[in-house]
Amino acid sequence: MEDKIKFTTSQLFNFQRDSYLERTSRPIYALIFLLPFIIFYEIGTIFINTNILDQSQVRVIAFVWLQKGLEYIGLGGKFAWIFPPFVVVIILILLQATSRRGWRFLASDILPMAVECILFALPLIVLSIVLNSSSPAAAALQAGPVQRSVLADIVTGIGAGIYEELVFRLVLICLLMIIFQDLLRISHSNSIIMAVLVSAALFSAHHHIVFIDGQFRLVESFSLGVFFFRTIAGVYFASLFAVRGFGITAGAHSFYDIIATLINVLFFSGQ
């Protein structure tokens, strides 16, 4: 039996089989770890003031894209609302089933995963404060400086952590890897680097200009500093995804948004 598993489409490193790093990078771990975040986001968008959530800047665009995809194939209404979380669940189950990796889950790994996500979020918190010392980029990974409740910011941040990572890392990077590595026959490591850079640029750009309802929309005026920060964040999250997988990356993104929101409220809300 091999001690290490083969390269997945988008994973840069192989880890010792059944080690903590190998277990927690599995899709089944991502599903179980992120399930409370998904439920919290869904409940939050139902019970928070709908006037707040209906503002286009507050919507998680990646979530809306998934909704529009369902409407495009003829399903709408309640189905369109519950479709995005089911997409996450189905994709992760399919990835686990096709990965030929173990299904065993240890509940004791959840707390270390949460601590790991918080620690991975902290460098971006520091960077956001350094780049904009008057007000750290709370929701800098989200779109638009809209005034809304703290709870709405947290709910939106968690949604961004899950659905932006789904679109720009889990889906986009895997597609780019297929193009670079399988079709263009570029080496695995170079394909990873190219996929990271392309996904990061698109991740940053989509916060300013989005394609929705068949047209491009400007959702936020361009700021070089914010664009630079988001590009770095995109590279950071893409690199983290390539090393630690979807669960840790989405968790780190969500914790970044939560921590940044709380810092703004506690230290910068009066400015």
Image: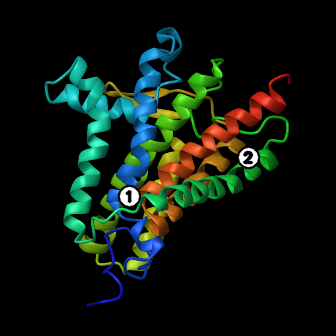
Q: Position of residue 190 (x, y in %)?
A: 44, 76
- Tag 1 and tag 2, C-beta contact below 8 Å: no
Could you tell me if residue 168 is visible in this image? yes
**Marker count (numbered):** 2
Taking 73 as reference, is 250 above or below it?
A: below
As drawn, 37 above or below 247: above
For image coordinates 53% across by 29% down, the residue present is: 155
Against 100, residue 144 (above or below) is above
Query: Marks 1 and 2, Cα distance to the nearest angstrom?
Result: 29 Å
| Pointer 1 or 2: first along the chain | 1
Q: Residue at x 53, y 23 (%)?
A: 57
The quadrant of the picture occupied by the C terminus is top right
Q: Residue furthest left?
A: 74
- Label 1: which secondary element: helix
Mark 1 closeness class: few <14, some 14–19, many ≥20 residues within 10 Å: many
Task: Tell me the quarter of the image containing the N terminus.
Answer: bottom left
Q: Position of residue 124 (x, y in %)?
A: 68, 52
Return the residue at label 1: 29
* Amino acid at the residue labelled 2: Ser
Along the line of sight, the residue nearer the viewer: 161 or 103: 103
Asked which secondary structure carries label 2, the reply is helix
State left or right for residue 154 relative to residue 216: right
Mark number, residue 128: 2
At a point 79% along the width and 45% down the height, the residue shown is 129
- Decide if residue 142 is on the left or right side of residue 62: right
Amino acid at pointer 1: Tyr
Quadrant in the rendering for residue 176: bottom left
Relative image position of residue 161 (x, y in whole percent)? 50, 43
